[in-house]
Image (cartoon, grey):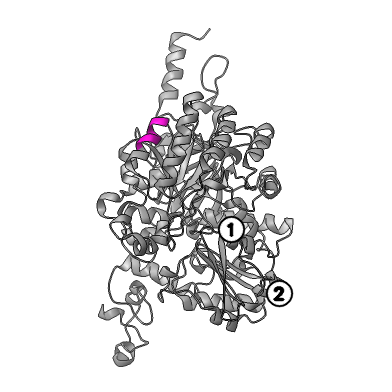
């Protein structure tokens, strides 16, 4: 029997800053077995924001079996090191919990990532078209060049989209498909031929094929009122073979790791069939190649047969089945097609049909009976209030208590609906779609109406569960820092100020929206989202201090070190030698990923990415004078010698004016 002194000693050891947490292993006499508890890795000499209110700052963490087992000072944590512990110096860099996207489409995005030319973060149409021209030149028949969302015309200096004539001039023979938000797609002549749209092709339900005076398709497809025509047309394109899809998904996950994303909740999506389209993720999980944790919701694919889908799934899929890397998370975001109010602020708000309530109730009752949580896409309060009528009706018969159900998006949600959600114990998952569509909302509804779309600050004040994400990859970019910037600054990617200061968040609150708050939406509260003992060991070291950089720099942040489960899945700069995640080149060999990398064309810094990186320098500089040679990278010029013997040339139109700043 252990003595009282033994028990006090054990309690003291476990209480030491929570250093061993739940992973301390007791020996037969009740004392911690330090040989078994020796950490796998220690990261020290950092400036770590933990989001643990009992210990908000630390300099070191110890990790065992993929979880934090100690968080504290260097002296406390380094004392736990054993002969086999990997010790990594954070070099006094600032570290944060890993970012966790509450709504994205990584399953679908990964299958196609290597085929897509991403205009995310590209700052001029001229650069975007130069990228398109280069990609057309190397894309073999019968493949397409696809620009599939993640951008808006407002991010371009020119403030416009390309014309179809401009696309045809670049690509007379290679099919080109360009998706812009949920509102339209541009197809060149070769793409129209590939999909078979002709003078006799009828408009599909919910969409319009624009035509010239002779009735021939022009190449412009409009979503009226939803994006079905856009996605159905895109689905006609060639697909990658399975092994290429595996490679593509790994490259997409690495791009997310580069931006500090360590986990996502996948919200399903149109033309994303379960289980077939999930086989790639399953293989990566089986092969221990997941570098982004993924919880997935199941999204019905059959209008008027939604109940059948969920009856089949609830009988064959167990809620939360899987692992910490790949796990089921419930139903949605599409529960019934009659409740889907896709946001396209260029057109009037769609009214949901009268059969919405009946169809939604049938599905919700199936989910409640099987104790499956759900998420429901809802842009407008008119849709939310009608859905709440259904949820309240079901709740009277079978309480929703304990089910982590929630609405997605909720741009125009009312105070009354927020309170009704609170009363039912639900949540609201917001995304940064307004950062890409805010200008269109203002054009239709006015700047005053746009001031709280969605009213994040008010939702937080009322105590409703709320978190943040992107809704990538089609309507908005997968870059989490754009979302964080949007919540902090209130600005769109085009620079328009949407929100007054009262509706913006401070940096810590915004960060919690992307970390600990998301855990409720995947039913993992206390398991992830903070850097504290017992939680999953996911953290990042941004390339600049999130709390110390200027507001305008936030959207340009990336990660220099991304750790998932204690493993370094991405390293850059001084941390590059630590990278444990080498990838083969992107497949196929003509993939745009090889040429341009990802967000902001970072893989082509002297070409298409130059202006995108230049905007980052401007944000950091915050001055009004851009140099013709260096842009806003004045520090590089100031660090060199001024050619004082040639001042006229030096300060010329194409010369360096940094010294005049």
Q: Give the side of residue 286 with respect to residue 105, left or right.
A: right
**Is 418 or 5 nearer to us in this picture?**
418
- The residue at which mark 1 appears reads as 228
For residue 530, say whether it is visible: no
Looking at the rendered image, the disc whose residue lies closer to the viewer, 2 or 1, is 1
Describe the element under mark 2 as helix, strand or loop: loop
**Is 147 or 47 nearer to us in this picture?**
147
Main secondary structure along the magenta-highlighted residues: helix
Q: Toward which corner of the image does residue 282 lie, by quadrant? A: top right
Which residue corresponds to the image point at 60% horizontal and 33% vertical from the top-left?
Answer: 319
Q: Give the side of residue 228 with respect to residue 453, left or right.
A: right
- Residue 421 within the magenta-colored segment of the rendering: yes
* Circle 2 Cα neighbour tier, 10 Å, few/some/many (<14 / 14–19 / ≥20): few
Q: Toward which corner of the image does residue 436 lie, by quadrant? A: bottom left
Q: CA distance from mark 2 to mark 1?
A: 28 Å
For residue 261, say whether it is visible: yes
Quadrant placement of the C terminus: bottom left
Which residue corresponds to the image point at 34% horizontal and 83% vertical from the top-left?
Answer: 656
* Circle 1 Cα neighbour tier, 10 Å, few/some/many (<14 / 14–19 / ≥20): some
Residue 642: x percent and y percent? 32, 83
Q: Toward which corner of the image does residue 243 lie, by quadrant? A: bottom right
- Region of the chain picked out in magenta, as a range: 419-424
Residue 80: x percent and y percent? 49, 33
Q: Are marks 2 and 1 in contact (CB under 8 Å)?
A: no
Which residue corresponds to the image point at 62% horizontal and 36% vertical from the top-left?
Answer: 323
Describe the element under mark 1 as helix, strand or loop: helix
**Is 162 or 504 nearer to us in this picture?**
162
- Residue 661 within the magenta-colored segment of the rendering: no
Which mark is drawn over residue 653? Answer: none
- The residue at which mark 2 appears reads as 140
Residue 215: x percent and y percent? 60, 77
Which residue corresponds to the image point at 44% horizontal and 9% vertical from the top-left?
Answer: 4
């Amino acid at each position: 029997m252990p003595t009282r002194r033994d028990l006090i000693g054990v309690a003291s050891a476990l209480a030491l800053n929570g250093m061993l947490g739940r992973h301390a292993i007791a020996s037969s006499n009740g004392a911690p077995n330090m040989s078994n508890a020796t950490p796998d890795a220690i990261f020290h000499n950092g400036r770590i924001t933990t989001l643990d209110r009992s210990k908000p700052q630390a300099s070191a963490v110890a990790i065992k079996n993929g979880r934090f087992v100690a968080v504290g000072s260097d002296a406390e944590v380094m004392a736990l090191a054993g002969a086999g512990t990997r010790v990594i110096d954070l070099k006094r860099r600032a570290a944060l919990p890993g970012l966790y996207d509450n709504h994205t489409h990584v399953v679908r995005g990964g299958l196609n990532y290597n085929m897509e030319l991403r205009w995310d973060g590209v700052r001029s149409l001229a650069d975007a078209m130069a990228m398109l021209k280069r990609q057309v030149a190397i894309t073999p028949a019968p493949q397409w060049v696809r620009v599939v969302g993640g951008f808006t015309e407002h991010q371009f200096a020119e403030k416009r989209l390309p014309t179809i004539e401009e696309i045809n001039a670049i690509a007379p023979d290679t099919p080109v498909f360009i998706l812009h938000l949920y509102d339209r797609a541009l197809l060149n002549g070769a793409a129209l031929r590939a999909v078979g749209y002709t003078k006799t092709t009828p408009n599909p339900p919910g969409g319009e094929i624009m035509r010239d005076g002779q009735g021939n398709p022009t190449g412009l497809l409009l979503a009226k009122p939803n994006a079905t025509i856009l996605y159905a047309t895109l689905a006609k394109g060639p697909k990658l073979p399975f092994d290429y899809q595996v490679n593509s998904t790994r490259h997409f996950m690495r791009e997310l790791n580069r931006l500090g994303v360590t986990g996502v909740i996948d919200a399903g999506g149109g033309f994303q069939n379960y289980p077939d389209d999930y086989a790639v993720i399953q293989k990566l999980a089986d092969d221990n190649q997941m570098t982004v944790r993924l919880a997935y919701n199941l999204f019905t694919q059959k209008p008027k047969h939604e109940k059948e889908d969920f009856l089949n799934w609830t009988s064959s899929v167990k809620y939360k089945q899987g692992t910490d890397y790949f796990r089921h998370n419930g139903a949605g975001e599409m529960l019934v097609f009659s409740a889907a109010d896709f946001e396209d602020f260029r057109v009037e708000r769609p009214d949901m049909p009268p059969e919405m309530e009946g169809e939604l109730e049938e599905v919700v009752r199936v989910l409640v009976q099987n104790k499956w949580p759900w998420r429901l896409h809802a842009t407008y309060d008119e849709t939310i209030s009608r859905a709440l009528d259904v949820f309240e009706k079901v709740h009277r018969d079978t309480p929703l208590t304990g089910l982590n159900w929630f609405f997605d998006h909720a741009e125009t949600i009312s105070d009354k609906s927020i309170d009704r959600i609170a009363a039912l114990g639900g949540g609201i998952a917001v995304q940064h779609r307004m950062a890409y569509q805010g200008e269109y909302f203002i054009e239709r509804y006015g700047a005053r109406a746009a001031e709280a779309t969605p009213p994040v600050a008010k939702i937080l004040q009322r105590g409703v569960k709320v978190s943040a994400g992107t809704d990538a990859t089609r309507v908005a970019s997968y870059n989490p820092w754009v979302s964080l910037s949007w919540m902090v600054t209130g600005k769109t990617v085009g620079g328009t100020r949407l929100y007054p200061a009262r509706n913006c968040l401070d940096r810590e609150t915004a960060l919690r929206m992307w970390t600990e708050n998301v855990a409720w939406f995947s039913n993992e509260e206390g398991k992830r989202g903070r850097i504290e003992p017992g939680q999953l060991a996911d953290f990042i070291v941004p390339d600049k201090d999130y709390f110390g950089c200027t507001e305008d720099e936030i959207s340009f942040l990336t990660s220099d070190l991304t750790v998932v489960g204690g493993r370094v899945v991405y390293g850059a700069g001084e941390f590059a030698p630590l990278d444990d995640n080498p990838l083969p080149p992107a497949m196929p060999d003509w993939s745009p990923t090889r040429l341009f990398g990802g967000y902001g064309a970072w893989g082509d810094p002297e070409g298409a990415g130059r202006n995108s990186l230049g905007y980052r320098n401007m944000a950091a500089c915050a001055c009004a004078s851009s140099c013709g040679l260096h842009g806003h990278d004045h520090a590089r010029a100031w660090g060199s010698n001024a050619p004082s013997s040639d001042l006229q040339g030096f300060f010329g139109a194409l010369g360096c004016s940094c010294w005049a700043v």
